[in-house]
């Protein structure tokens, strides 16, 4: 049952039968820790006690059937250990059906190997089985308890198979399916608790038993301390609904995007798994049921046991984007509403006074130039300035969020802090989103490397909260500031200088080039340079309405509106060419498009880059060129149709926008109709129009734009 380096998981001196260790839960835990310490298995009994009580404070560990499993990961033990007590009288551990008479204290070392966790995983599953608990209650000696545990918990010579539901190649055969000859309903589930030791696996066991009783084919992914074997994309695709029984975030949740979902804490299936299975079946049959948020294109599509480098790179980048997009949407819409209520003057000195004035100073605000163009209301103008300030604050998190969650995708939670810092550094060295992507990757790689360094047992608890964040921030930060700052800044300056060299030479050509840049990466480095070029010129624009800087700003904003608008229109005109998730995204893309949030096109481009990106580039180029041809001007740097009051030549504005949108829509539909591409599921493939399967997108697709 043990390997050469570890003592036995449980021994007779770790067992107490028919004892009263304390009058209540906390006192009983103290007694179990004392038994652990008396057996010589505790490095620091006080640390064990504190960690167990801290875990207990998160949620009670009492289970139905008179069982309690207080547990923790702690630096107070060197090896995984089980301490058992049969309590007389029983003690209340918070279970719904009463007090517990069987108590296992499960202690695992911080940073312990996955094999140790799998031993504890087997015990947690065994506790959900009546035969095992009956043997514990019938035991007359500690040796009998040890024998019962050893019969349920074994250590195979080879690495044990994941203790999940049967694999896709060997599905369960529920009784109902066997008798009817029909395929049973298919469900998938994810279980995870904060420590990943006990509840994770007991919830999985309970769900599997309930599914078998209901005649349902269920496969479970346990995201525990023993690691997890992800459900295959084929199994997820075939599922009718998904059950999330978790107390922590689901890893790579976007794999389940669009599936009907039932969510709960990890204890609910242990208490009432039958009700959860029934609820999941009802959700599967209900078109209006709650569904997993996100786009299926955000998930990795690698097949087989190993994830390809291409798929891994895309997964990492798309993780950063998926966490960044809420900042983009919230900030962009707040800025647009700010312009609507406060006018374009809120971007200058009139808007700055919001920080030093209150609503009681409306006359002073109006005198400073803050005015609402539509309603001539100082109150609405002040509201607009407030909304603009909130939107600008949200946009300030775009690059740090992108970098932070890229690092998180590489190194898990220890990578978040150094990733966010690298995102902030990208702004300091003026490298924008390109710097954010590079900084996030650096922070994640360094954090992952530091996390793999072998350290003494006593230091393991410090690694994720101190050593890894500190070391990764220091190393990645020095590389960003000392090595990469000048090259990245030079690259951004070179792109800007290239645009400046075109200014005045050919207005229509300049507009078309700006349109191509805005649509190519939908918020990436090229998009950012084009937008920065326009806003920099806007700040120096002359007072006349025909200033060339105003025309450049109009071309950039109009071209940036085309991609999401065209794809929204395409999903409406030919919905069968798009997946259900893409059709849902199309509804949101339309509103994002009129608000000048180009990122609304990212899910479509990420799923099908070879057909979508050239099509929207064509439409944006047409719009940019027509905008310059019609002498459209714009004094506001953001806002879409909400800043129509700041537009010079409104008719030309809409003609250019409509023309480019129609061209891009026609190009997308033609590409999907006449150039179908079969999806192989491997990295680098393109989705078919009918399935909307994911594909690897170029790195530029996943960056977003810093505006305003």
Image (cartoon, helix red, strand yellow):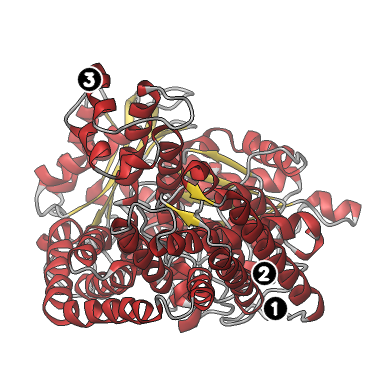
Mark 1 vs 3, N-terminal side:
3
Q: Residue at x 28, y 33 (%)?
A: 369
State how far apart marks 2 and 1 are (Cα).
Answer: 7 Å
Q: What label does residue 361 carry, if any?
A: 3
Residue 59 coordinates in the image, percent (x, y): 35, 34
Secondary element type, mark 2 = loop
Between 563 and 48, which is closer to the camera in this rendering?
A: 563
Contact check, label 2 and label 1, Cβ < 8 Å = yes
Residue 237 coordinates in the image, percent (x, y): 68, 62
- Identify the residue at the far right of this view: 180
From this view, report whether residue 333 is shown above or below residue 503: above
State how far apart marks 2 and 3 are (Cα).
Answer: 55 Å
Secondary element type, mark 1 = loop
Mark 1 neighbour class, 10 Å CA radius: few under 14, some 14 to 19, many 20 or more? some
Q: Residue at x 26, y 20 (%)?
A: 363
* Residue hosting label 2: 693
Mark 3 neighbour class, 10 Å CA radius: few under 14, some 14 to 19, many 20 or more? some
In the visual, does 530 lie left or right of 661? left
Asked if one can make out residue 489 in the rendered structure from this viewpoint, the answer is yes
From this view, report whether residue 485 is shown above or below residue 396: below
Q: What label does residue 617 carry, if any?
A: none
* Residue hosting label 1: 679
Q: Residue at x 44, y 31 (%)?
A: 66
Q: Residue at x 18, y 73 (%)?
A: 476
Mark 2 vs 1, N-terminal side:
1
Between 52 and 555, which is closer to the camera in this rendering?
A: 555
Mark 2 neighbour class, 10 Å CA radius: few under 14, some 14 to 19, many 20 or more? many
């Amino acid at each position: 049952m043990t390997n050469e380096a570890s003592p036995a998981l449980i021994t007779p001196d770790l067992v107490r039968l028919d004892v009263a260790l304390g009058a209540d839960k906390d006192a009983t835990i103290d007694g179990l820790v004392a038994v652990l310490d008396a057996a010589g298995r505790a490095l620091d009994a006080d640390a064990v006690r504190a960690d167990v009580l801290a875990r207990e404070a998160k949620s009670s560990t009492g289970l139905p059937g008179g069982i309690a499993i207080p547990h923790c990961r702690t630096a107070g033990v060197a090896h995984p250990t089980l301490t058992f007590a049969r309590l007389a009288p029983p003690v209340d551990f918070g279970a719904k059906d009463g007090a517990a008479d069987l108590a296992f204290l499960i202690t695992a070392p911080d940073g312990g190997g996955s094999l140790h966790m799998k031993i504890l995983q087997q015990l947690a599953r065994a506790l959900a089985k009546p035969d095992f608990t009956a043997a514990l209650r019938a035991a007359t000696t500690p040796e009998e308890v040890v024998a019962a545990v050893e019969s349920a918990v074994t250590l195979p010579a080879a690495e044990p198979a994941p203790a999940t539901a049967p694999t896709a190649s060997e599905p369960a055969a529920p009784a109902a399916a066997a008798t009817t000859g029909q395929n049973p309903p298919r469900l998938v589930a994810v279980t995870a608790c904060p420590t990943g030791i006990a509840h994770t696996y007991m919830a999985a066991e309970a769900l599997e038993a309930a599914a078998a009783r209901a005649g349902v084919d269920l496969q479970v992914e346990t995201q525990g301390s023993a690691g997890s074997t992800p459900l295959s994309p084929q199994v997820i695709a075939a599922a009718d609904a998904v059950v999330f029984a978790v107390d922590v975030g689901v890893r790579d949740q976007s794999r389940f995007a669009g599936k009907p979902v039932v969510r709960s804490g990890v204890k609910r299936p242990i208490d009432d798994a039958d009700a959860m299975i029934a609820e999941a079946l009802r959700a599967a049959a209900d078109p209006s049921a709650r569904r997993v948020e996100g786009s299926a294109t955000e998930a990795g599509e690698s097949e087989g046991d190993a994830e390809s480098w291409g798929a891994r790179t895309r997964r990492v980048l798309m993780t950063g984007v998926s966490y960044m997009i809420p900042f983009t949407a919230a900030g962009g819409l707040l800025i647009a509403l700010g312009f609507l209520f406060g006018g374009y003057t809120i971007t200058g000195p009139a808007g700055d006074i919001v920080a030093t004035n209150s609503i009681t100073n409306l006359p002073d605000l109006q005198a400073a130039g803050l005015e609402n163009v539509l309603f001539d209301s100082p109150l609405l103008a002040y509201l607009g300035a407030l909304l603009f300030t909130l939107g600008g604050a949200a946009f300030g998190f775009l690059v740090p969020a992108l970098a932070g969650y890229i690092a998180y995708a590489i190194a898990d939670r220890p990578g978040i802090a150094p990733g966010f810092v690298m995102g902030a550094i990208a702004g300091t060295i003026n490298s924008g989103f390109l710097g954010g992507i590079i900084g996030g990757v650096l922070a994640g790689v360094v954090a992952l490397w530091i996390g793999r360094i072998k350290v003494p047992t006593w230091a393991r608890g410090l690694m994720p909260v101190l050593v890894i964040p500190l070391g990764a921030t220091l190393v990645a930060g020095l590389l960003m500031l000392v090595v990469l700052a000048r090259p990245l800044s030079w690259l951004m300056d070179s792109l800007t200088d290239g645009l400046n060299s075109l200014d005045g030479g050919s207005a229509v050509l300049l507009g078309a080039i700006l349109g191509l840049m805005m649509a190519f990466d939908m918020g990436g480095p090229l998009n950012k340079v084009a937008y920065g070029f326009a806003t920099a010129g806007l700040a120096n624009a002359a007072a006349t309405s025909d200033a060339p800087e105003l025309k450049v700003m109009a071309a950039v904003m109009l071209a940036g509106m085309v991609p999401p608008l065209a794809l929204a229109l395409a999903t409406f005109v030919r919905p069968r060419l798009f997946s259900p998730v893409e059709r849902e995204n199309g509804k949101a893309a339309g509103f994002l498009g009129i608000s000048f949030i180009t990122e609304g096109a990212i899910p479509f481009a990420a799923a099908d880059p070879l057909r979508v990106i050239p099509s929207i580039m064509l439409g944006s180029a047409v719009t940019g060129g027509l905008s310059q041809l019609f002498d459209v001007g714009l004094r506001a740097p953001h806002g879409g149709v909400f800043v129509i009051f700041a537009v010079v030549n409104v008719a030309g504005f809409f003609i250019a926008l409509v023309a480019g949108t129609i061209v891009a829509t026609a190009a997308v539909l033609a590409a999907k109709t006449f150039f179908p591409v079969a999806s192989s599921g491997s990295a680098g493939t393109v989705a078919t129009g009918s399935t909307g399967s994911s594909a690897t997108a170029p790195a530029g697709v996943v960056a977003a734009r810093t505006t305003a």
